[in-house]
Image (cartoon, rainbow, N blue to C red):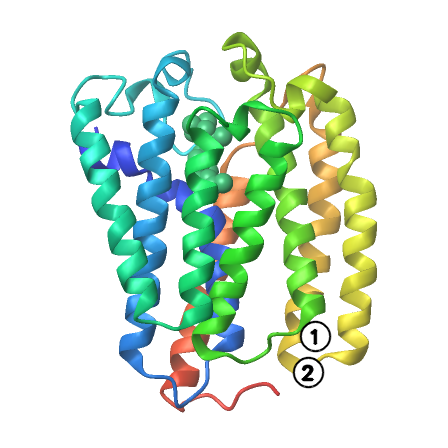
Amino acid sequence: MKSKYIRLLRPVAWITFLLPFSVGFGLGIKSNSHPFIIIYAFIAFITWMSFSFILNALADKHVDKFHDGRSKDMNLAYQSIVTGEITEKKALYLSIIFLFSSIIFAWLVNTLFFLLILIVDVVGYIYSMPPLRLKAKPVTDIICNTTAGGLIFIAGLSIGGENLYPLIILAVFVMTSIFYIPTVVTDFEFDKKAGIKTSAVYFSPKRLLQVMYPLTAFLVVIGLIILLTGNLELKLISLLIIIYTIPSTIVANLRLKGERLFIHENWILVPFILFSTVIIIYGILKVMGLFIPLN
Ligand code: GPP
Ligand code: MG
């Protein structure tokens, strides 16, 4: 069994946000960027995720206990607040420490990065915690994840300050909403049983998955414009986005049997972590001046 802190923070689940952050980092970084700025930025990312996931574990305590282990980074019935290994009071203290750490480290990076981390901290709060608890309402659950994914991408870009190109930012917002849909559909039975009206519960799994088609078509159009107008780095990224998103949308729609979506979490987690690793290495090589940027 993983340590009680790992089961509270759920670092494997951060991978979904690590991808936009690291792509932003890899695209935005310059050879004259200071290594400490990059370290502070990654600490701000980690502390933001820790803050958001602790609040999520706190707020979902009575929901997570019903989880059967399907389609997630872990069986949530074993998250440490449900099992009582970490008290709610302690979790709350930890979340406050992580919140302040994310703000302080973000401040050391740059003003735009700082403002974006402040906003995603707020999103992390209102997503899980009452009175808003936007994760339990249709549409706002998608908006929160899309906003967090898109803004953390811009934060990543801002570390080095290059490639702040509106179309790639729009593409990442659209891509985040596309990939959030199958994750909320796999939660359908679990959320319905817990009485949470997510977009999947409200619109039905089938109809929500179908929304991936127009979103993917829109993403392809944006991708094609970037392919025609962007620099080599952006062309490569938009090509990869198109190549990965089209089959994902088709497969997600084909794998729905009744109201149950049969997709293993590794179909998202493994490509996301592999791509994040490659682009982080690419970014580090750029900083070290060992890679001639694909501009
Ligand atoms: C998981 O939400 C928690 C997060 C994604 C925290 C960060 C969210 C932001 C929008 C910043 P969940 O409760 O919907 O999923 P799970 O059932 O996996 O806990
Ligand atoms: Mg949760």
| Residue tagged 2 | 231
The location of residue 38, given as percent across then percent down, is 34, 73
Residue at (32%, 42%) from the top-left corner?
Answer: 51
Q: Residue at x 29, y 21 (%)?
A: 78
Structural crowding at the residue carrying mark 1, measured as other residues with C-alpha within 10 Å and reported as few (<14), some (14–19) or many (≥20): many
Count the marks: 2
Assign the C terminus to one quadrant of the image: bottom right
* Amino acid type at image mark 2: Asn
Cα–Cα span, label 1 and label 2:
6 Å
Q: Nearer the viewer, residue 71 or 207?
A: 207
Task: Work out whether 154 lies above or below 264.
Answer: below
Which image quadrant is residue 231 in?
bottom right
Q: Is residue 231 above or below residue 152?
A: below
Left-right relation of 282 to 52: right
As drawn, is 5 to the left or to the right of 112? left
Q: Position of residue 168 (x, y in %)?
A: 67, 67
Image quadrant for the N terminus? top left
- Say what secondary structure mark 1 lies in: helix
Above or below for 266 versus 232: above
Measuring from the top left, give residue 160's x and y in whole percent.
45, 79
Task: Determine if residue 36 is in view.
Answer: yes
Residue at 39% across, 18% down: 64
9 lies above or below 41: above
CB under 8 Å between callouts 1 and 2? yes
Q: Position of residue 260 (x, y in %)?
A: 64, 18
Q: Is residue 75 visible?
A: no
Query: Which residue is pictured at 62% across the width and 40% down the height?
Result: 143
For label 2, the crowd category at 10 Å Cα-Cα, with few meaning under 14, some 14 to 19 and many 20 or more, is: few
Frontmost residue, 196 versus 15: 196
Mark 1 highlights which residue?
Answer: 235
